[in-house]
Image (cartoon, helix red, strand yellow):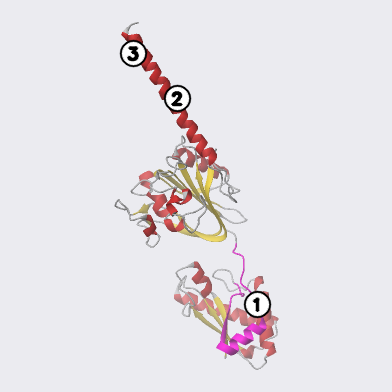
Amino acid sequence: MSAWSAVGRVCLHRLFVYAFLALCLVCVDRSVLAQTKDVPASKDHPMIKRFERSAIIGYEFKKFNDLVLLLGPVKGQYSPPLKFEYEMERDKSPLTPTKTQTVEGQSTRILYVAPQERSTLEVLRNYELELQKNGFEPLFKCSREQCTQQDGALGWLYLYPPKRRLLNIPPPTGKTNKFESVSWSALSYATDQHFLSAKRTSAGGDTYVSVYSARGGYKNHQQTFEHPILLLEVIDAVPMENKMVTIDAAAMAKEVAATGHIALYGILFDTDKTDIKPESVAALEEIAKFLKADPKVGVYIVGHTDNVGGFEHNMSLSLRRAEAVVKELTTKYGVSAARLKAVGTGPVVPLAPNDTDEGRAKNRRVELVKQ
């Protein structure tokens, strides 16, 4: 046998070994993804299909929430090693967006893991085509360093920072280290990032979408390491349900007698308008009952706003809303105009800081103040 024949057999043997190992890696990857099932109670958004053979590893649905939609690149950078991720929960992200829009409505957040052999660009382009097919118009797109100075930072430091991460896999317990959660760490140290924001306008309400795709870089979790990870966030702009409990006439009388005033949240107005919404009827009826039960009492109807908008505008708006309540009580409920006085204080008597949606909602109110 010639030396070349022996060399040929060795080369052929190595070729078979390499092919077998490659096949094993593919099989392992597919089996890992097959074992990664959708987290309980999760589902795709009805308008947007998932990428083929993807699994949901993080899910959150809220009937009403807000989203700061990215409309431009994000500035700023970090110097490795970055502060321990737990500490970031107390501190702000080192990245700052150049342009955003805050949108509110029904909120869906889904974190997907896709097959390892697919590229992050392929995954994002498929979502882009799906959105176009469903009538969405792109608002902003970027890739790699176009999004942030360091590729991958947009996900784990801005769109999916520690404060906003999901803890679906495994379910959190009192003793669970967050880094043990596949969902929580999925986008840590990611690379090859791509982003798209889009909007769909319809008569039933607008829909806003944020789509982020990157390759997982957290080595401790084989379910996500080197896999394309996709973060999908959707806001369906539907009105918030009114869940404020209507205070009855007896409770109004008791509170006014004890403190001289009472804050009411059942009298509703559209944003920046003075027309009283139909849902306010129950609160107005109780105010009328309270006043008719004690014909001697007179009240100031005081309008309050949050601090969004100009000061003079809010002062005027709060007075005009108070006047609208007085008019409603006198014309529809038979309350004497002599017992009522409209006052507008705008944003100057807040009950909570105006830094959050919850605080601003608490400050938007009508108060009855005993004369």
Bounds of the magenta segment: 239-268
Q: Give the residue type that dot 3 points to.
A: Val
Q: Is residue 265 magenta?
A: yes
- At label 2, counting other C-alpha atoms closer than 10 Å, the crowd grade (few under 14, some 14-19, many 20 or more) is few
- Farthest residue, direction top: 1
User: Mark 1 or mark 2: which comes first in sequence?
Assistant: 2
Point out residue 158 in the picture as x, y percentages from the top left corner. 41, 54
Give the residue pinned by disc 3. Answer: 7
Q: Which quadrant is home to the N terminus?
A: top left
Residue 238 in view of the camera = yes
Give the residue pinned by disc 1. Answer: 283
Give the residue pinned by disc 2. Answer: 20
Asked whether 76 or 26 is in front, the reply is 26
Which image quadrant is residue 311 in? bottom left
On screen, residue 295 above or below 269: below
Horizontal side of residue 272 vs 294, given as left or right: left
- Marks 2 and 3, how far apart at CA: 20 Å
